[in-house]
Amino acid sequence: MYALEAEVHPNFKDITKSFEDPSDRKIWKSIMETENPQKIAMPPIYEDRLTSFQKFILMKVLRESKLLLQCKVFVKAELGAQFIESPPFDLAGSL
């Protein structure tokens, strides 16, 4: 976490302090424990400050096992919902 804060990008400034802050700690804890962390908004300052790609990177650090879910959020935000939804299948037209 310190690498993200100190060397990567100013948007991650004070993120380690956010983990220690009593009001933010509840949010981070729910992100760490929930089955769908991509559906939980980050603490307000980071929800506003981080780009969708930076949120993707942060999810990689925090919950790598849930990265595919965050990938869908990223693609939808950057490219649009049509890139994550399957088109309807026309069985009659395929014959």
Image: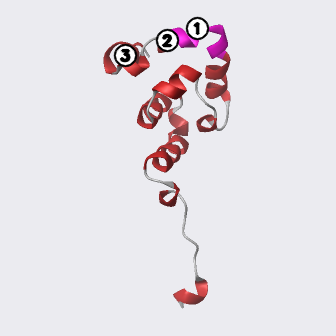
Judging depth in this view, the residue of 45 and 42 nearest the camera is 45
Residue 46 at x, y percent in the picture: 51, 23
- Inspect the magenta stretch and tell me whether residue 47 lies in it: no
- Residue at 42% x, 36% y is 53
Seen from this angle, which residue lies furthest left?
Answer: 7
- Inspect the magenta stretch and tell me whether residue 23 lies in it: yes
Mark 1 secondary-structure assignment: helix
Q: Disc 1, disc 3: CB below 8 Å? A: no
Judging depth in this view, the residue of 36 and 83 nearest the camera is 83
Residue kind at label 2, given as amino acid type: Thr
**Disc count in the image?**
3
Image color mode: secondary structure
| Residue placed under numbered mark 1 in the picture | 20
- Residue at 60% x, 8% y is 21
Mark 3 secondary-structure assignment: helix
Q: Which mark is residue 3?
A: 3
Callout 3 crowding tier (Cα within 10 Å): few <14, some 14–19, many ≥20: few
Which contiguous range is marked in magenta? 17-25
Residue 56 at x, y percent in the picture: 46, 35
Nearer-N-terminus badge (2/3): 3
Residue 41 sits in which quadrant?
top right
Callout 1 crowding tier (Cα within 10 Å): few <14, some 14–19, many ≥20: few
Residue 64 at x, y percent in the picture: 50, 34
Task: Say above or below: 69 vs 15.
Answer: below
Residue kind at label 1, given as amino acid type: Glu
| Residue placed under numbered mark 2 in the picture | 16
Callout 2 crowding tier (Cα within 10 Å): few <14, some 14–19, many ≥20: few
